Image (cartoon, rainbow, N blue to C red):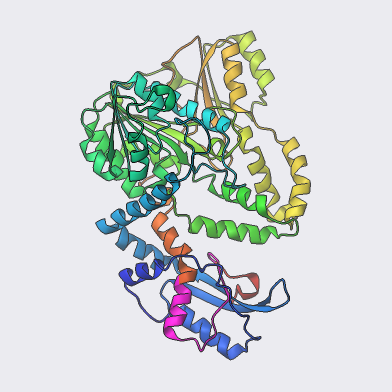
Amino acid sequence: MAGSQSDTELLADAELSGEVCEGASREAPPLAKAEPLETVRNLLEEHPAIAVAQLEVCERQAGQPELVAYLVPDLGTIYATEENLASAAEWTCESVALWNLIFDALYHREPPNDDPTLNSIGWVDSATGEPLSAGEMYVWLADAVQGIRSLEPRRVLEIGCGTGMILYRIAPHCQHVHASDISRQALDLLESRRGQAASQGGLPPNVTLEQAAADELCQRAEGFDVVVINSAVQYFPSIHYLLLVVRNLAESLPHGGAIYLGDVRSLPLLESFYLECLLAEADDDGLLELLSERADVQRQSETELVIDPAFFSSLPQVISRLARVEIVPKRGRGTNEVFRYRYQVTLRIGDPASVPVEEATRLAWLDWQAAGLTLERLRRQLRDEVPRMLGLAAIPNARIDRSRAVARLMRPDAGVQTVGELRKRLPGMLDQDLGVEPEDLWSLAEECGYAMTWSWARHDVSGHFDVYLKRGNSDETANGIGWPEKVLAQDVDATLATRPLAGRLIGNLPGVARAHLEDRGSGGLLPDRYELRVGALPGRWANR
């Protein structure tokens, strides 16, 4: 591949944005001859961020021809550019400034409900585009607040407070909450309510506000005992930025303190999430092969930080002040993406050697499926045998039933070609493999007199979870539990998360390609539409 371009130039090109990714509305070209098409293809492949390009004259729905350019990114160039830019302080500032603009614009809108303490503007279902209901948001919020209050915080630093949904509910139980956000608009909205009655969303008097980014705040967290970062990590620019923030916070917090990270997007379940969204809008005659290709492209062009739980499980290997890591799913019977594809993390500060050792460290874990367990069989076992403690491993998660069934139907050996065929066969697949609704298990444990602790530290594409039951009501069940073996990363690197900057560069590549052709001169022949491919072109060019 000929040609070269500096990192700065590539980023400048990327700033043209992806607005032309689907192609501008242009007069359709005449059916192009092979020679001009070859010239355009060669010009596209001159760009260092494009590994392979191909052009095809397709027919529009109106019967008119259009020229389509298929682009395969050069990931080596993209990742090298990403690493060079990410090491520069100005990129972090630029990333924070970009999200600041987005959130400032968002918070200018009217809130979707009448509760001033539940301004859920921007919370939408990715599959349908519809706002999440107030009922769903209350369930989501109750779980986060419960998780934070269980840490018994006194002085809280909240990074990414947004419209204040968390701080309104924890501030009455704390001495002081210092809430920060990168959005000036969000903070001004909160400040405007200072002095108002609590029933009108008045800002609690023990709350202070500051506009600052996480990498600034983590260096001055002394004096706080709990740090809350809820539904904000996904906007961090990289996994290395997150590691820096967590490391600095761990050094600042006292023994017994904690870092609570809520609403972390799951990397193992990311493809399932994409497929769910794509299926929701796909026509019945759509090809599953094309759907899978689009999911691959979405993953590579993801601009949010989506994290493998193995990253958090491995943190004590590189941060000595972390005594324990707890990774759990969301509580509640919600069915939207925040309950199915996100998890909570609590990082406990202290000496690992000081953690009490439970007898559960020597417990033989019972594999749910291998033991043929059901909720009714478990109920009988708990009542008849009355074990003092019981470990249940790899429990199939009913929240992921649909995703597992879709994955099986999309395998080549399933013989399913179209979206319509998948939709017809899906109900039968769901009947064959029913998982356990986590809330039903919580209810059963309470009914039988057991305290339940659960973990999602080992979850993969299956979404399975582990449960520890201990006879009696105990708040200490998380201490020293020898959970089934986790997958620990050998190194905390970029493979444990998406790469937001690389995703931004890839997502902007169609706009970059168009600008490149206009700059280099393509004889007036410009594609009407650009489509990204990751790893391969459509089958007819696979062996080119």
Front-lying residue, 483 or 111: 111
Instruction: Tell me, yes or no, whether the highlighted magenta stretch contains residue 533.
Output: yes
Quarter of the image containing the N terminus? bottom left
Q: Where is residue 385 in the image (x, y as percent from the top left)?
A: 61, 10
Instruction: Tell me, yes or no, whether the highlighted magenta stretch contains residue 411.
Output: no
Q: Is residue 57 left or right of residue 327?
A: right
Q: Position of residue 448 (x, y in %)?
A: 59, 11
The residue that appears at 48% across and 21% down in the rendered structure is 363
Q: Splitting the image into 4 quarters, where does residue 125 fall? A: top right
Q: Is residue 536 left or right of residue 224?
A: right
Q: Where is residue 415 in the image (x, y as percent from the top left)?
A: 75, 55
Query: Is residue 404 depicted above or below 456 in this figure?
Result: below
The residue that appears at 25% across and 28% down in the rendered structure is 224
* Figure disc tally: 0
The residue that appears at 30% across and 54% down in the rendered structure is 92
Q: Is residue 244 left or right of residue 337?
A: left
Query: Is residue 400 depicted above or below 237 in this figure?
Result: above
Is residue 481 among what the camera can see?
Answer: no
Quarter of the image containing the C terminus? bottom right
Q: What stretch is highlighted in magenta?
A: 512-535
Q: Position of residue 445 (x, y in %)?
A: 57, 16
Q: Splitting the image into 4 quarters, where does residue 526 fall? A: bottom right
The residue that appears at 46% across and 68% down in the rendered structure is 509
Is residue 397 among what the camera can see?
Answer: yes
Front-lying residue, 473 or 500: 500
Front-lying residue, 376 or 528: 528
